[in-house]
């Protein structure tokens, strides 16, 4: 009797899970973007919406909820029903860095990561006529002139990275607040800062000759800019990466996550979506739920080491 009861319970559980998959999506799917309209994250997500709508067979809506490095959008989705109908689209650091660096209304464990749809090509850059062409030359100049290095800053990642580098190189870093990657570009081209970070907004200005890159902030070299030296090349044991990820609330049935991830994979192959990412100098490489979860965990370890170095 007991064995039969267990079998019945197992069959019921499987049937319920399959039922969720068949029922999903149940009406429009909403993607909540963690950054403002017009930026790289927003542009790529909106280019994904149409092919994802076709793959799922329902309307896909896009809403912007900027603030707190993606934290506002993440908090909103964490509190949503765990049915896959509401998705947060934000940078991976929203999960790998923010919760361990500050008090947040959510944690990484509040989510199931569904997919990655692109990687930002993060790099430090400066105005083309600056006299230094490498991090070593910039540090040497700062030490020779006994001056701090001023950098354009618009989120926690660049502050943490530059503070980490400053401690390692023995030079003071001063963050100059700007609004987003475009603000970083404006500050760099105006000569208001010595160096600036962007996840890709720097590319057209480097191509035009107005700016030049100094180094990639990732540990390994960037896929779209393989000739640019990386943190590994500079002798560092860690670097920072930033991916555009899609996640749902914890408790979303695995069958729903699998169905959603498959639909995102299909939509990510859309040529217009890929071109939207490439135009923003983002690598439109799809990664599934398992790979996305793993890359966020890897990032979290690197950020933990940087945070420890601040003590």
Image (cartoon, grey):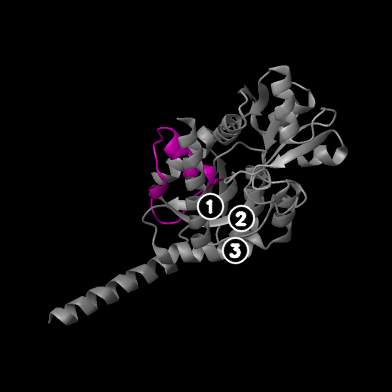
**Residue 144, how many percent across, how many down?**
73, 21
Dot 3 falls on a residue whose secondary structure is helix
Q: Nearer the viewer, residue 234 or 14?
A: 234
Question: From this viewpoint, is residue 157 visible?
Answer: yes
Number of the label disc, if any, that sits on residue 246: 1
Q: Earlier in the sequence, mark 3 or mark 2?
A: 2
User: Spatial distance from mark 1 to mark 3, Cα to Cα?
Assistant: 11 Å
User: Spatial distance from mark 3 to mark 2, Cα to Cα?
Assistant: 8 Å
Question: How many neighbours does mark 3 have within 10 angstroms: few (below 14), some (14-19), or many (20 or more)?
Answer: many
> Is 173 inside the magenta-drawn segment?
no
Residue shown at the point (79%, 27%) measured from the top left: 189
Q: Badges 1 and 2: C-beta atoms under 8 Å apart?
A: yes
Q: Badges 1 and 3: C-beta atoms under 8 Å apart?
A: no
User: Spatial distance from mark 1 to mark 2, Cα to Cα?
Assistant: 8 Å
Residue 304 versus residue 4 in the image, above or below:
above
Residue extending farthest to the top is 146
User: Which residues lie in the magenta part?
Assistant: 80-109
Q: Relative to residue 60, is residue 230 drawn left or right?
A: right
Residue 102 versus residue 1 in the image, above or below:
above
Question: From this viewpoint, is residue 57 visible?
Answer: no
What residue is shown with label 3? 265
Q: Earlier in the sequence, mark 1 or mark 2?
A: 2
Q: Relative to residue 3, is residue 283 drawn left or right?
A: right
**Residue 91, how many percent across, how many down?**
56, 44
What residue is shown with label 2? 117
Residue 187 versus residue 247 in the image, above or below:
above
**Residue 272, how many percent across, how many down?**
73, 56
Q: Quadrant of the N terminus?
A: bottom left
Dot 2 falls on a residue whose secondary structure is strand
Number of the label disc, if any, that sits on residue 191: none
Q: Earlier in the sequence, mark 1 or mark 3?
A: 1
Residue extending farthest to the left is 1
């Amino acid at each position: 009797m007991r064995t039969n009861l267990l079998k019945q319970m197992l069959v019921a559980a499987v049937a319920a899970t399959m039922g969720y998959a068949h029922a999903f999506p149940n009406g429009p799917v909403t993607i909540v973007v963690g950054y403002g309209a017009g930026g790289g994250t927003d542009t790529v997500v909106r280019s994904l919406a149409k092919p994802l709508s076709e793959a799922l067979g329902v309307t896909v809506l896009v809403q912007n909820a900027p603030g707190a490095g993606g934290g506002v959008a993440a908090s909103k989705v964490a509190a949503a029903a765990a049915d896959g109908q509401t998705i947060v689209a934000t940078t991976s650091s929203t999960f790998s860095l923010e919760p361990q660096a500050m008090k947040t209304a959510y944690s990484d464990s509040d989510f199931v990561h569904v997919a990655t749809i692109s990687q930002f090509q993060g790099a430090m850059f400066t105005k083309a006529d600056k006299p230094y062409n490498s991090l070593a030359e910039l540090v040497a100049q700062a030490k020779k002139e006994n001056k701090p290095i001023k950098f354009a800053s618009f989120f926690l990642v660049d502050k943490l990275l530059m503070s980490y580098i400053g401690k390692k190189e023995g030079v003071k870093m001063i963050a100059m607040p700007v609004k987003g990657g475009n603000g970083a570009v404006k500050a760099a081209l105006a000569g208001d800062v010595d160096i600036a970070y962007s996840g890709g907004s720097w590319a057209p200005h480097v191509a035009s000759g107005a700016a030049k890159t100094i180094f990639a902030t990732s540990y390994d070299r960037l896929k779209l800019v393989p000739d640019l030296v990386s943190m590994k090349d500079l002798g560092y044991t860690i670097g920072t990466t930033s991916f555009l990820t899609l996640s749902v609330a914890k408790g979303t049935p695995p069958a729903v996550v699998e169905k959603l991830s498959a639909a995102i994979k299909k939509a990510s192959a859309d040529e217009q979506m890929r071109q939207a990412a490439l135009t923003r100098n983002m690598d439109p490489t799809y990664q599934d739920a398992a790979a996305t979860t793993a890359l966020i965990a890897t990032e979290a370890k690197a950020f933990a080491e940087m945070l420890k170095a601040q003590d």
